[in-house]
Image (tube, rainbow, N blue to C red):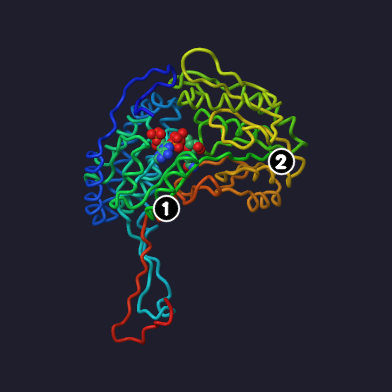
Amino acid sequence: MAIATTNPVTGEVLKTFEALTEQQIDEAIGRSEAGFRALRKTSYAQRAAWMRAAADLLEAEQDDVGALMTQEMGKTFAAAKAEVVKCANACRFYADNAERFLADEPVEASEVGAARAYARFQPLGPVLAVMPWNFPLWQAMRFAAPALMAGNTGLLKHASNVPQTALYLGELFGRAGFPAGAFQTLLVGSDAVEKILSDSRVRAATLTGSEGAGRSIAAIAGRELKKTVLELGGSDPYVVLPTADLDRAAQVATTSRCQNNGQSCIAAKRFIVHTDVYDQFVDTFVAHMSALTVGDPMADGTDVGPLATEQGREDVEAQVADAVAKGATVRCGGTAPEGDGWWYPPTVVTDLTPDMRMYAEEVFGPVAGVYRAASIDEAIELANATSYGLGANAWTDDPDEQQRLVTELDAGAVFINGMVTSYPQLPFGGVKNSGYGRELSAAGIREFCNQKTVWIGDSGGADIDSATE
Ligand code: NAP
């Protein structure tokens, strides 16, 4: 894919960029390694001051960077600005909490024959971050804020269609005071990733993106014996049971499916509704979906902008056409308009069967598939009948049903009577083909740390236990 800003509203290519040469990449990795040697010696207090300065810059510049994101990938300006503020909050969260999250963890020294024993968390070094375009700032920040606070350095290979947001990020942390090389953007295509990850100076990698990209990075990292965190796709279920507040469930379903123009990994994508409330829920859901305003993402009051890429729209169109050809019913939307830009309307599809692509694949656009379940058992079975396992939403006021759903849904997160979303305070990640490892919270900052075992004895002390390895 060309490295370029292309406005999804018009399809017009606004700016193109040359990929870095091999020599430029080599020099950047060198700066990253040198930056690591400098950064690892700084105190948490110093890094926290720089991280808070980055948060201040983000807040002050939210209009400009928000407009840039809207121009590059089509999210509404309001959502883009909210994303910038969320990033600033994450910077402050890790500034406030990194030292506590990475404090030495003592163990009972006498049980291991030591005078003192503990685990110490130390940074690994330069980490490659391969990131997607859908939340161009937030996805990268979820990696950058904890990684830098831990003392790692970052090399960002961003999606090729958000180069200007990538360049903004590449300068942000240096402007905030972090040492040269602490965080850099590499404008490169995905074909450059193998060489970068194979470089011995790069110690680990994180990828947020599609399942295919995840498999590719995991294969390279496996060969190179490097730690990875993979945040991949999802086809999250949204289970609605009879005791739920149906109006609220339908309203939140609409937000969950259509947020970010339908292009979120944790958007609810499969709506599984108990047969007793199926008709009422579907009617209300269709009414909410049909009432959304689709249009200029910069305009006040727009709910849904265009899809980010031409290919993305083609994929969604093909998935819906396949379902219709095999007997599914389109309850609203379902046809892309003629003309410029990559628009696709909010769409609800019912009567889906396992032979249809929508049944098994992630749909990355504002298209909801609705399924009928005869019981909670069938709802859970349907919810788990996917190769993905990122998030799961469920609506019920019955405490026993809530506990069954929490226990039995195969997902990295379960949200009851709400929609799956990310908070710096909560771990985020998937199971099954949605990936492995966690971002955010204490779990996220520890992913790229050496958990070093420290055992300190008394030199005149007891015999050494050499019986086991
Ligand atoms: P993508 O095509 O996989 O691209 C993501 C990143 O990976 C881009 O930087 C891309 O570079 C790079 N890439 C693609 N193929 C690669 C390969 N074979 N080797 C190395 N790098 C490769 O995904 P996307 O279309 O941008 O994003 C949508 C997907 O991301 C969806 O499946 C969505 O669910 C998932 N996602 C997951 C999460 C999560 O937290 N779990 C969050 C957001 C999105 P180029 O742009 O240069 O091709």
Which quadrant of the figure contains the C terminus? Answer: bottom left
Q: Position of residue 68 (x, y in %)?
A: 36, 26
- In this view of the protein, can residue 469 be seen by the observer? yes
Q: Nearer the viewer, mark 2 or mark 1?
A: 1
Q: Is residue 198 above or below residue 15?
A: below
- How far, Cα to Cα, is label 2 from label 1? 43 Å
N-terminal of the pair, mark 2 or mark 1, is 1
Q: Nearer the viewer, residue 277 or 95?
A: 277
Task: Determine if the C-beta at disc 1 is less than 8 A from ligand 1.
Answer: no
- In this view of the protein, can residue 138 be seen by the observer? no
User: Which labelled disc corresponds to residue 241?
Assistant: 2
Amino acid type at circle 1 is Gly
Amino acid type at circle 2 is Leu
Q: Position of residue 23 (x, y in %)?
A: 22, 39
Q: Position of residue 106 (x, y in %)?
A: 40, 70
Q: Position of residue 188 (x, y in %)?
A: 32, 35
Disc 1 marks which residue? 222
Q: Residue at x 68, y 52 (%)?
A: 404
